[in-house]
Amino acid sequence: MNQQEIENLYTLMEFEASRTSPPEGFPVLPDIPAGRYTDPRFHELEKQHIWRKTWLFAAHIDELPEPGCFLVWENAGQPVLIVHTMAGEIKAFYNTCSHRGAPVMTEKSGKRSSLTCNYHGWSYNHDGELMSIRDPEDFNGLDKSCRSLISIRCERFGNLIWVNFDEQAQTLLEWLGPIAEEWQEFQFDSCRLIGRHIFDLNCNWKVAMEANTEVYHVKSIHAQTVAQTLDDRRNVNTFYPNGHGRMVAPSKKASAPRTIAPPPGIKTIDTVGPIGRECTQSYGIFPNWVSPLSNFFLPPLQFWPNGINKCRFEVWTMAADWGDGPKPDLVNMWTNEDGSELGAVLLEDTQFGEAIQRSMESYGFKGVPLSYQEARIYHWNQAADRMIGIDNIPAELRVAQVMGEEWIYPNEPRLAQASQVSAG
């Protein structure tokens, strides 16, 4: 983030604190249809389009540190086998044997000299090529070159491994757009994995995710935690292409400076600028990544559907490389000491999820009216409809495309309005 962008953010913080209504020209946001959280039709459209066409963060290189290592990944509802090849590449395949469809690897992770299906012994190398079959004399004219594992798009952003089931999708860097450049200061190419845990929640995955994409709830849900230090009235939301978003909120001026010492064993990421050091700087990557990024931690939260009214909540903690020293004692910044339960802030965010879901399934739930503070949710939904294909969505489940390009980064109408306020 360059100096001008930093100055712009501080200007916008003061603009947000001074306004008494949404910015001039900001559209009225129509209600989000209720069925997007409860209707099986919309759930199926998400499966067919959103989870099939987007880049999904799947693994960290520390989970496949050497050639021969593999990881079975099924968070998106498909059997995926991620492999560290002998040439040092990371590749992904459907974990489906080309013989009778059995899973090639049944262990969750490990290291093997070859990938051998336990059902009938068909064996593949780490590039997915079929190398040998049992009793080859019983197969007449079998061409092994046509029986490789089916590959899946797999790309890296630094040490983070992403997959995409759409062969026609744009590259990961194109998908991230300007965020990829903003993230350079966080040194994802040298970050290490500290902890990764999954918790089951009894609510639609978007109910859980949306609690982490707005600050409107902070004074109610986090009255004794986040609200003590976060200045929600100075929060600045940014809307990026492809449905991505960012929030930047400073600490309250009366609270203690955020430049606290890191936990034992955690190194400071020295290249992080003043926004990451002094503010809560959180990114939403479409469809299901939310993460505050700081000079201490890179801790993504991810939300995976497990049915219409259930989801899996995955919490990660990554940090700067600790070199030859021991791994930090910290298990996960989002959990208790042994990783068995969510920590206090996330328990506050998730405590009402099941009750919200039950209430949404009532006859009385008609839709969601969103405030300007919650506009990142609306921006996400607009992008979801475009990815699904607006004509594929029943009319009563669509959102209106009211947020135009004039509100999408790098466009920023609020800066001109802020200048008028300061001048007058």
Image: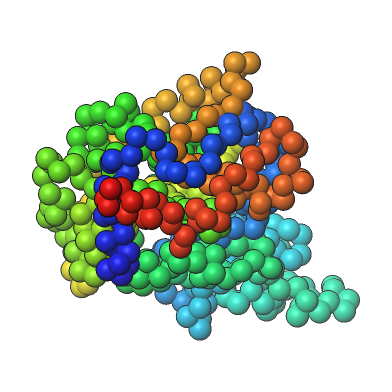
Q: Specify the farthest residue to the front.
A: 424
- In this view, the residue in front, 323 or 260, is 260
Residue 275 vs residue 184: left or right?
left
Q: Is residue 329 above or below residue 65?
A: above
* Residue 278 location (% of width, % of height): 20, 54
Residue pictured at 42% horizontal, 39% vertical: 22
Colour scheme employed for the rendering of this structure: rainbow
Residue under the point 12% across and 40% down: 254
- At 49% from the left and 43% from the top, the residue drawn is 26
Measured from the top left, where is residue 213 in percent x and y?
A: 42, 43
Residue nearest the observer in this picture, 24 or 377: 24
Q: Quadrant of the N terminus?
A: bottom left
The location of residue 285, given as percent across then percent down, is: 48, 55
Query: Residue at left 62%, top 55%?
Result: 79
Tell me how many marks there are. 0
Where is residue 55 drawn, in percent x and y? 56, 60
Q: Is residue 147 visible?
A: yes
Q: Is residue 423 left or right of residue 352?
A: left
Of residue 68 and residue 320, the one placed in the foreground of this image is 320
The quarter holding residue 101 reads bottom right
Looking at this rendering, what residue extends furthest in the right direction?
140
- Figure check: 122 above or below 336: below
Q: Is residue 182 left or right of residue 55?
A: left
Look at the image and tell me whether residue 319 can be seen: no
